[in-house]
């Protein structure tokens, strides 16, 4: 392996904060980490873009896959299986790399026609599906018959073990920090990931709070075979969402998310805004008698208004605590490359430096 510029810098030497411009083109892509996840999905870097409603369109999925990660189209953002088939074809037109489709199994009486969505995925030749929400058990035969690798996203060790038992190939373990639905156990990743490592035989990725090389090295240290990022990928040039959304993520801090719908046992971590404050006030008033109808205005049909129209106060929309680490809007490739460069720097300089007994000089980080 050729020696890399950052590998030759002594561990104690102060270095400028890594940013997009510090990545030299020759350097990019040289450092790659082989893990069970990169091997399973045939990708260069162990970085997955989680499915996101009204964000995970072909543009973003293709950009992530072209940059060596695994891009994921959000299945149910496409209102019909036919539209999903078109979105898959559109993504294929933009990337010849592997990409996946997210299928979120919702707790609803009027379930979407999941078997037809799966048929569209199979016919589109997609070989990776990220499932989330309810257990994918009843759909496993159809997915497996299509030769599809299934990575199930879950928020507890018991659900991860269940996913393993029903034949999922991998799991994405979502800690309490995550944007979207963190479950009801409130288990942060510092505990959840090593617990998952103790129990699981299948590989898993760390999800929730992941933003950069620091997250990647930490996740690998805790037993994960890669990372899944949601919120961080929204603040990228290619994310096909309104500029207001990206600006709001750069402006927000780690203190700006709230948990809503706890009493409905459908807890969601969202970015605070006027509608969320109103929602929390209604929740306070209604207590345990809260019904979904009481907050329907704040939660129904919100995503197109926010993501397409840029109406940030339209309702509650998912966002992770990791928003506190988002300071810029790079291209997806810049984000992935610098994550890998930073991970290498941490491993080769900081960690090996500790082993070599080199004194550490802290410097302010400005990455993510
Ligand atoms: C705006 C937004 C929409 C999301 N929509 C979905 C979704 O439709 N299905 C799903 O499985 N996960 C969804 N997620 C969760 C992400 O896939 C991912 O698990 C989560 O964002 C990871 O946490 P992070 O935001 O801290 O990276 C969403 C997250 C965000 C921020």
Image (cartoon, helix red, strand yellow):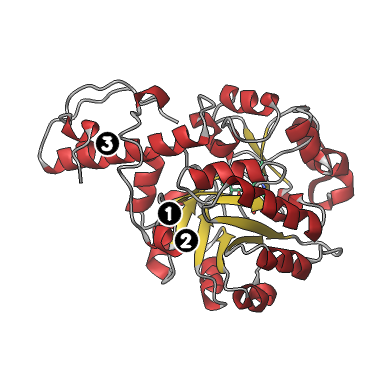
Q: Secondary structure at mark 2?
A: helix
**Residue 20 has which mark?**
none
- For the residue pair 349 and 68, the one nearer the viewer reads as 68
Q: Which residue is mark 1?
A: 191
Q: Mark 3 highlights which residue?
A: 345
Tell me if mark 2 has few (under 14), some (14-19) or many (20+) residues whose alpha carbon lies within 10 angstroms of its own. Answer: some
Residue 51 seen anywhere in this rendered image of the structure: no
Q: Are dots 1 and 2 in contact, CB under 8 Å?
A: no
Q: Quadrant of the C terminus?
A: top left
Residue 280, located in which quarter of the rendered image?
Answer: top right
Instruction: Please tell me which residue is depicted at 39% across the width and 25% down the height of the picture.
Output: 19
Measured Cα–Cα span from mark 1 to mark 2: 26 Å
Element type where label 1 sits in the image: helix
- In the image, is residue 129 above or below residue 71? below
**Residue 346 drawn at (x, y percent):** 27, 38
How far apart are the alpha carbons under marks 3 and 1?
Answer: 25 Å
Q: Would you name the residue on which mark 2 appears?
A: 41
Q: Nearer the viewer, mark 3 or mark 1?
A: 3
Task: Say which residue appears at 54% left-offset and 76% top-offset.
Answer: 167
Tag in front: 1 or 2: 2
Residue 240: horizontal and vertical position, in percent?
A: 67, 35
List x then y, in percent, for residue 71.
Answer: 56, 49
């Amino acid at each position: 392996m050729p020696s890399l510029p950052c590998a030759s810098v002594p561990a104690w030497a102060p270095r400028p904060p890594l940013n997009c411009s510090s990545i030299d083109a020759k350097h990019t892509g040289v450092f790659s980490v082989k893990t069970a996840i990169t091997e399973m999905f045939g990708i260069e870097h162990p970085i997955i873009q989680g499915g996101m409603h009204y964000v995970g369109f072909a543009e973003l999925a293709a950009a992530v896959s072209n940059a060596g990660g695994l891009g994921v189209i959000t299945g149910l953002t496409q209102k019909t299986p036919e539209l999903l088939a078109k979105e898959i074809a559109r993504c294929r037109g933009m990337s010849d790399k592997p990409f996946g489709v997210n299928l979120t199994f919702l707790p609803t009486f009027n379930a979407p026609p999941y078997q037809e969505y799966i048929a569209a995925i199979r016919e589109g030749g997609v070989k990776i599906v990220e499932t989330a929400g309810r257990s994918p058990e009843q759909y496993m035969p159809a997915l497996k018959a299509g030769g599809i690798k299934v990575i199930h996203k879950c928020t507890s060790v018991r659900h991860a073990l269940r996913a393993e038992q029903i034949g999922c190939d991998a799991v994405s373990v979502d800690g309490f920090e995550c944007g979207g639905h963190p479950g009801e156990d409130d288990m942060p990743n510092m505990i959840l990931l090593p617990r998952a490592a103790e129990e699981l035989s299948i590989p898993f990725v760390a999800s929730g709070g992941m933003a950069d090389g620091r997250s990647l090295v930490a996740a690998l240290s805790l037993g994960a075979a890669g990372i899944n990022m949601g919120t961080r990928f929204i603040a990228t040039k290619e994310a096909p969402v309104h500029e207001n959304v990206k600006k709001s993520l750069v402006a927000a801090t780690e203190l700006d998310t709230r948990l809503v719908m706890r009493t409905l046992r459908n807890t969601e971590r969202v970015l605070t805004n006027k509608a969320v404050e109103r929602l929390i006030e209604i929740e306070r008033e209604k207590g345990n008698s809260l019904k979904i109808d009481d907050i329907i205005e704040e939660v129904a049909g919100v995503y197109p208004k926010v993501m397409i129209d840029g109406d940030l106060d339209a309702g509650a929309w998912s966002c992770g605590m990791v928003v506190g680490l988002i300071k810029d809007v790079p291209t997806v490739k810049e984000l992935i490359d610098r994550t890998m460069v930073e991970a290498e720097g941490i491993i080769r300089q900081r960690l090996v430096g500790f082993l070599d007994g080199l004194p550490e000089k802290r410097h302010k980080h400005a990455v993510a």
